[in-house]
Image (cartoon, helix red, strand yellow):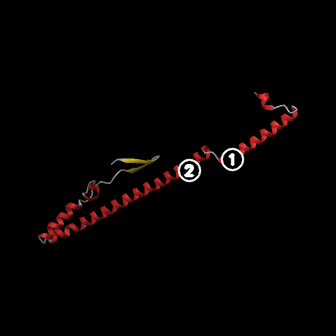
Amino acid sequence: MRNVEVAERVQVAEKLTGDQLLKGASGGVDAFAQLTQLRDALAVNDVATVLATIDPLQNATEQVARSRMTVGFRLNRLETHRSKLKETTFQTRQLLSNSEDLDYTTAILELVLRQNTMDVARNALARILGGTNVMSLIG
């Protein structure tokens, strides 16, 4: 069985096969064989064989229940890591947005402040130079 890495150092088994679930792969009970044996025993009214299939069928039922629990556990782990990944993605986007996006209100206020400062400086310089056009000095 192959494992899939779902997070750093976290792996989940890729699948649970039908053979593992119902046919007794990996040392389990072959539910189909037991059901076939039960059907055949019922058809010929073979009470001893019917009784002999009860325990193996109970084991097959427990095997299916364990498999369902295993799959549920895997799904739960995947959902947990999916939620963590979504949260991490959200936080990363938030950090990126905070560092890269322009705050237009702050930028406009800063621009207006700088323009006002420049106007005041230009007017002060014009008074110091006695009415000379400051722009003609620059050009």
From the top left corner, tell me how far across and down residue 87 is, in percent.
52, 53
Which of the 4 image quarters holds residue 43?
A: bottom left
Q: Marks 1 and 2: which is nearer the front?
A: 1
- Image coordinates of residue 52 in percent, x first then y, are 20, 67
Left or right of 15 in this view: 34 = left
Q: Residues within 10 Å of mark 1 (few under 14, many from 20)?
A: few
The answer to whether 37 is drawn above or below residue 93 in the figure is below
- Between 67 and 7, which is closer to the camera in this rendering? 7
Total numbered badges shown on the rendered structure: 2
Residue 77: image tag: none
Spatial CA distance of label 1 from label 2 is 23 Å
Circle 2 packing at 10 Å, graded few (<14), some (14-19), many (20+), is few
> What residue sits right under mark 2 in the picture?
91
Most extreme residue toward the left is 44
Q: Is residue 2 above or below residue 63?
A: above
Q: What element carries label 2?
A: helix
Label 2 is placed on what type of residue? Gln
Q: Residue 31 vs residue 119: left or right?
A: left
> Quick one: 53 or 33, which is closer to the camera?
33
| Residue receiving disc 1 | 106
Residue at image location 40% in from the left, 57% down from the top: 75
Query: 60 or 77, which lies in front?
Result: 77
Residue at x 14% of width, y 66% of height: 40
Q: Which of marks 1 and 2 is nearer the N terminus?
A: 2
* Residue 58 position by quadrant: bottom left
| Mark 1–mark 2 CB contact (< 8 Å) | no
Q: Is mark 1 on a helix, strand or loop?
A: helix
Amino acid type, mark 1: Thr
Q: Nearer the viewer, residue 116 or 37?
A: 116
Residue at (71% x, 46% y) in the render: 109
